[in-house]
Amino acid sequence: MNYAQYIPLLLVLPLLSFAVLGIWGRKHLKNTSGILGTLVLLLLSIVAVSVAGHYFFVAEKLNDGYQSILALNIPWLTFGYKNLSIDMGLLLDPISAMMLVVITVVSLMVHVFSLGYMKGEERYPTYFAFLSLFTFSMLGLVLSANIFQMYIFWELVGVSSYLLIGFYFTKPTAVAAAKKAFIVTRFADLGFLIGILMLGIQAGTFDFLTLIERLTNPESEAFISMQAAGFLGISAITWALCLVFVGGAGKSAMFPLHIWLPDAMEGPTPVSALIHAATMVVAGVFLVARLFPIFHFNPTALNLVTWTGALSALFAAIIACTQTDIKRVLAYSTMSQIGYMMFALGVSGYGGEAGLGYTASLFHLFTHAFFKSLLFLGAGVIIHAIHSNDVKDMGGLRHALPVTHICFLIACLAIAGVPPLSGFFSKEEILLAAWQDNPAIYAIGLFTAGLTAFYMFRLYFLIFWNKPNTKPIHKEGSLWMKLPLIFLAAVSIVAGFIPFSQLVTSDQKPFWSSFHLLFSIAPLAMVILGIFMAYRLFKTPGEKAAALALRMGRLYQAASHKFYVDEVYLFVTRNIIYKMIGKPAARFDKQIVDGGVNGLGNGTRVFSEKIKGLQNGRIQWYLLVFLGGILLLSIVFIGINKI
Amino acid sequence: MNLLLLLLIPALTGLAIGFFPAKQSRLLALTGSGIQFGLCLFLLNNFLQQPDATLSGALLFQNDFVWYRALNIHLHTGIDGISLSMVLLTAFVVLAGVLVSWNIQKMSKEFFILLMLLSAGAYGFFISLDLFAMFFFLEIAVIPKFLLIGIWGSGKKEYSATKLALMLMGASALLFVGLLGLYMNQNGAESFSMIALAANPAPLAVQKFFFPFAFIGFGVFTALFPFHTWVPDGHSSAPTAGSMFLAGISMKLGGYGCLRVATYLMPDAAHYYAPWIILLAAIAILYGAFATMMQTDLKYINAFSSVSHCGFVLLGIGVLTKTGIAGAVIQMVSHGLMTALFFAMIGMVYERTHTRDISKMGGLLKAIPFISTLFVMVALCSLGLPGFSGFVAEMMVFIGAWENTNTLYRIATLAATASIVVTAVYILNAVGKVIMGPVKKESFMQLKDAAWYERSAALLLIAGILLIGLAPFLITNLIEPGTQSIMDKITIITK
Amino acid sequence: MNYLQEILVISTALFFIGIYGLLTRRNIIAILMSVELMLNSVNINFVAFNKYLFPNSLDGIFFTIFIITIAAAEEAIAIAIVINLYRNHNSVDIESTTLLKF
């Protein structure tokens, strides 16, 4: 139990590092800040890995299941209503322990990589300060014991992402992308917030454990009242869960809230590897997993999760086949893979083998974090080498960047799901879970698996084979940049052999997942087909790809324009929100509210203009009026007396 | 501790500034407001050590002088947690305001005297327990604003000063009718004493008649829709310290009055009119946010966003739940600190770039990093980022509002919640254009970053914001007895 | 004989003649004279009331003397004003002194 006392360190260290680098970095730690930040992260990873290791392998289990440990719980803000309060707690359970490992390891790799990649940047210390802030917020998010606390860190993660996307703040595109990312996720967070309010106030608690306990017990008062209350024929609990999921979908770039993710690639590439591939974007999956017992009781909300996930997976994969910006391809691929995780949660049952989808989803989250950050870091090396993001400028780079080439290939094989690399195992489990629950979802998943292999190898062949277009300006870079690639490649190879169903399960009790050799035939065939097509089309320069694109006609056009989702958003914001709400509001203020007050002033002036003629300076006229007044008054008073 | 000290020190400082040469006035003002700041902290310490402070909503440190016997007017002072937090807010803003105006050249003597007068008015308002004295101090806090804007302002300052003074005077007239209504209707025992009035509320018909007068009268001060139009013009024309006072303190006078006078003394009528208050508050929140979106002048942006943010104060009061009222109080403190800091930062930017048009600025982060960093921080506070005070206040209001299960309240709450997105849009737009982006003019690179007095003002205010944002239990514990006693009043009447 | 009624008619007539002059004359001197007429009508009233209603007291007579004294003083000031006015405007027409307006 006493290892839990080290958990607060996980938050204190990065926060301290942020404060130190943020306040003194610019002046006093100009060159050492990178090393300092990386050392803190190293320490942090050691703590995190040992805490997680201890949790999984040493700590005592209860009824064969992992216990949820509340390491800390401080009342932060209390309300005078149903004893409602927001506490600051640290909750350690299998998913948060797993996330600790993912976040700290990937963050450490990104820190190391950045030592080389960001060298010579003017705002080098600030960069590392922001990375620390992000790590702090992300760790806080996964350790939150309380849904409101999670919302707090959720917002902090959003703002660190904003700051990092906008790191090159003199670039207008970066500023616009940062703004877009923040606003789109904020819009989603609005749903999250309302969902939290509904859940918290109805259930009388924000605490995860109590919330789950109350809302999964059909006899509890909270459960009954939330089932009974409703709006538009949908019960309150469904509304609340769907709204919470909207928040998760926004952060995880699910359709149709995904538009910020491709643009977010304007940030420095290591940041994309950390935030927009491995950690922050999976927060939505984490959120659904965290509340999974409640979701499980609500088929409507779970269906929403499933279909949003499946559609996003397919949709993003199709777009990824047509993009030419290396980072955008990776971004759409991230979206697609997160779609996988989402629908895996959606098709999952609860407890034992039925919870295979849950395990598979988090397994995929785990493996994806490593190979996707590897892909991004590899892309970082390539961009660093030829100073361009566009695959059209690349080609034949396998000789110039040998280490990157091998690592990139490993990552591509892993994400495509080629055995025995890690992606194969996790994707296999997801497809198995989908097959058991819903064949339609399985079909989408299978097709997407083929597409994944196709677009990843399209990227691979276009970058490393094909004909050379640009001579590399830089070599592969220092050891700092190679080391993380090699490490992540190694992890991507072996991570699949982790017996995940022993560690992370829906009811926290381990089970043995069965492995069907026959079942793997179909996905594997799709993957091989995808790779083969990419090989035929893109290995050597030629017109084949262009001809195919031409033959696809409209579909290709639409996909390369990302199905016009951005245009729809632009239309809504420009023409509806600005023109129909903002401008009228401003005009109303200028003309009616302001005009009302000015009108009152003007009215007074006009009135006084009118009556000022009485004051003409002629004393005899005054006298006459005066006498007339007296006369009038005397008549009135005499008249009153008579009556 | 005698609360009249809080009035004495600004008054003495003002006098001293009058007698010494103009060169020394800024130093005197700084000393005076520094002493006052220390005194307020001392008061806080004393307050927390009182055994009654946390137990009940007792008003402590009471002092009662007869001011005008024939009309039963007293100078009755006393504080509870709510007024103490307001007093502390005033101390923060005044000290920061004096620091920001360190370099004022034009008639600096008169400027600082007026600032001291304003602060004396605000302190007096918050500690008064007698409605007449309260009204008196409210007026003291209004008149110097006219001069501050008219003399030291910029832009169409005469227009704005007149508009502000006339609207606030009009509001005061309404308010006075409301106060007189309370005064006259006590079965012969005419009194302005808040304690007596609370113990013996007026009959329902009287409350219903006079509540709108008092509420709208105070409401105009806190930018109640549609009487908010003095806010944008007044703020944008005022000198930096003037805007800080206006938004940081003056608008809070109204909020405090709405809570302490209108709602607390006329609880029945508050229930009766609650739907209207909520409606107006929700409109102000959303409408202010949308109107802000279309502004291009930094000061107008912050002024319109103040309309939106002060809507939260009214919403918190209108929902009549304990959480809502606590949220309203915290929002007042939070918005006071935040908006004062925002205006201070805008003032610093304006002093350097000589423009407030966001399309004419850009890339300031490269040129003046300290100011820009603080600017971004306060902007993030304004959009309700956790860790800053705005988040705590808004969340308390939301939760307080959501507690009320009435459909109208729910819809109003949803509308208010939606404002967090719109807020994000206009705040990030401003930050993106002013702080980020390419450096618009070569000359920006030659600008000097903040001087010591600007730094200390900004750090003082951000410290307050962070303190509330990171440890909100400090302020909730402070105001809890006060909100509880208001709640007791409201709920007893309901039953 | 009680002539009060007749005397009052005369004084009233005198008063209104004064008012008529006050309102219609353009010459300031004439206006002053009209004021004198009004004052004198009041004097007549005082004396008449004293004689017929309160024959044992002298209050009315005293007031008359007061009024005559004050009228003389007033006249002196008024004439001084008129002379100054004449110096500035070269006229004693009341229409030429309408500067005191809006």
Image: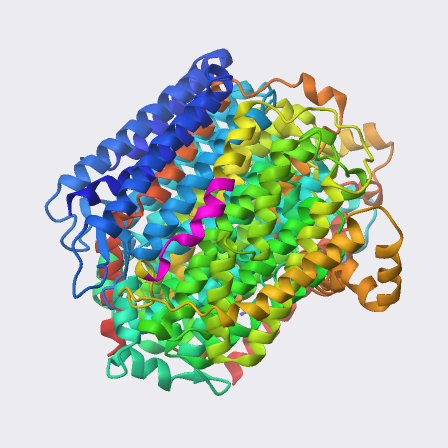
Magenta segment = A489-501
x, y percent for residue A130:
49, 34
x, y percent for residue B20:
44, 13
Q: Count the numbered circles shown.
A: 0
Instruction: Indicate whether A34 appears above or below B285.
Output: above
| Quadrant containing the N terminus of chain B in the rendered view | top left
Question: Relative to B157, is A295 on the left or the right?
Answer: left
Q: Which residue is situated farthest in the front direction here?
A: A518
Instruction: Indicate whether A146 appears above or below A161.
Output: below
**Residue B150 at least partly seen:** no
Q: Nearer the viewer, residue B457 or B231?
A: B457
- Residue ID at (70%, 27%): B354
Q: Nearer the viewer, residue A489 or B460?
A: A489
Question: Relative to C14, is B240 on the left or the right?
Answer: left
Question: Relative to A410, is B464 on the left or the right?
Answer: left
The image quadrant that residue B263 belongs to is bottom left
Q: Nearer the viewer, residue B363 or B24?
A: B363
**Residue A579 at least partly seen:** yes
Is A499 colored magenta in this rendering? yes
Q: Nearer the viewer, residue A307 or A519?
A: A519
| Quadrant containing the C terminus of chain B in the rendered view | bottom left
Is B234 colored magenta in this rendering? no
- Residue ID at (72%, 28%): B439
Instruction: Indicate whether A119 appears above or below A132.
Output: above
x, y percent for residue A33:
46, 22
The image quadrant that residue B147 belongs to is top right
x, y percent for residue B484:
23, 60
Q: Main secondary structure of the magenta part?
A: helix
